[in-house]
Image (cartoon, coloured by chain):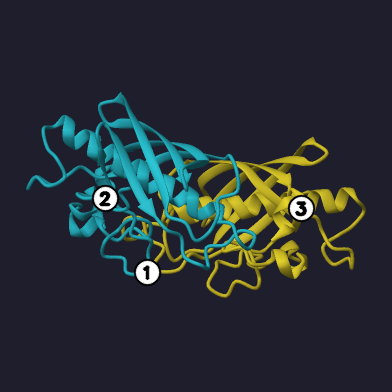
Chain colours: A cyan, B yellow
C-alpha cells in the first residue's frame, strides 16, 4: 500500500507561499500535508500526532478539517496546473489557491495511531474556482467526508 | 472590551474528556479554547500563534475551523447544561458533545496578531442535538462564519 505522495504540489509552491501551517514545507511547526495525483484523483497521507486528540483514542476533528482544507487547495492547484499542461515535477510554478468554504461530515470516530488517507475528486466550477470532494479513510474505513471550494489566490494576498 | 471568558464550560468537563487538542484544559500542546455565555449567546476568544499562518500575515483556515468546531461543541454543552438548570460554575458536571458536522465560510482573510472573537447562536434541533451558528470577528470585522451540528457524546466514546 502506498503511504507517501511521490510528487507533492506543496513542494513546488513558491517560497513566499510555503508557510501554511497545514501544508507549507517551510513551516517547521506545521502539519506539512503533501498532496499528489493518484490517477485523476488526488491523495494526501497523514498520521496525526499523539496530542491531536478529541476524546483519548480518537483524532481531533479540527485536524481532520485541516487535512481536508489543505487537501482541497492542493488538489485545486494540481488540477489547474494539469489543465495548463503541467505536472508537479514540471519546472513551471503551480497556481496557489485559497479556501472559500469548507465542510466536514464526521461519519465515525477516527482512531488515533493510524495513517489517514484523504482522497479528492475534483470538479471545475469556474476557470478560477474548483470544488473538491474529499473522503478521509483510516484503515480503509471512511471516517469523514468533506467538500472544499477553492479559488485562485487574489493578487492582494501577495502584496505583503 | 472583554478579552477573556469568565466561566468556561471546558474548565468543567470531566478529566477523562479534557484532552481535546482544541479545547481540553489538560492538553498542554493544544489550543485551550474557552467558551462561555454572553447573555444568550456564547463567546470564545483566541489569539492564533505566529506559526498559525496561511499566507504570511493571515491566519490559517484550519485554525479558524478548529475554533468554530470547539466553540460549537462548547456552546451545545452550555445550552443543554442551562436547559437542565445549571450554569458552568455549578457543581453539576456538564454534558459532553461531539461534532457531527462542521462548515466554514471564509468571508475575508483573517489578520494575524489579533485576538479573534467567536460568537455563537444556539438552536436545539433535537433533545440531544444542537445547531450552533458562529461568527468569527477580528478587530470587530467578520472574517468567517460557520455552523456546527453537535450531538451528545455516545457512551461508546468513554469506553476506552
Residue A5 tag number: 2
Residue where numbered disc 1 is placed? A29
Please determine whether, in this image, residue B159 is positioned above or below residue A96: below
Residue B77 tag number: 3
Q: In which quarter of the image is residue B14?
A: bottom right
Q: Is mark 1 on a helix, strand or loop?
A: loop
Tell me which chain the residue with mark 1 is part of: A
Are the residues under marks 2 and 1 on the same chain?
Answer: yes
Tell me which chain the residue with mark 2 is part of: A
Please determine whether, in this image, residue B44 is positioned above or below residue B83: below
Query: Picture coordinates of residue B29 (x, y %)?
Result: 53, 72
User: Looking at the image, which is closer to me, A58 or B93?
Assistant: A58
Q: Quadrant of residue A43?
A: top left
Q: Mark 3 to mark 1: distance in Å?
A: 31 Å
Residue drawn at x 73%, y 51% is B156
Q: Mark 2 to mark 1: distance in Å?
A: 20 Å
Amino acid at each position: 500500500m502506498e503511504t507517501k505522495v511521490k510528487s507533492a504540489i506543496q513542494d513546488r509552491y513558491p517560497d513566499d507561499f510555503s508557510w501554511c501551517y497545514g501544508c507549507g514545507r517551510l513551516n517547521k511547526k506545521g502539519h506539512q500535508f503533501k498532496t499528489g495525483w493518484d490517477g485523476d484523483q488526488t491523495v494526501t497521507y497523514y498520521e496525526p500526532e499523539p496530542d491531536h486528540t478529541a476524546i483519548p483514542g480518537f483524532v481531533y476533528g479540527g485536524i481532520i478539517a485541516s487535512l481536508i482544507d489543505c487537501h482541497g487547495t492542493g488538489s485545486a492547484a494540481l488540477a489547474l496546473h494539469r489543465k495548463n499542461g503541467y505536472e508537479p515535477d514540471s519546472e513551471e510554478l503551480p497556481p496557489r489557491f485559497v479556501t472559500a468554504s469548507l465542510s466536514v461530515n464526521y461519519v465515525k470516530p477516527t482512531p488515533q495511531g493510524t495513517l489517514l488517507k484523504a482522497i479528492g475528486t475534483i470538479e471545475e466550477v469556474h476557470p478560477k474556482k474548483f470544488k473538491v470532494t474529499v473522503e478521509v479513510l483510516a484503515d480503509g474505513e471512511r471516517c469523514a467526508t468533506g467538500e472544499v471550494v477553492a479559488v485562485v489566490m487574489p493578487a492582494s494576498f501577495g502584496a505583503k
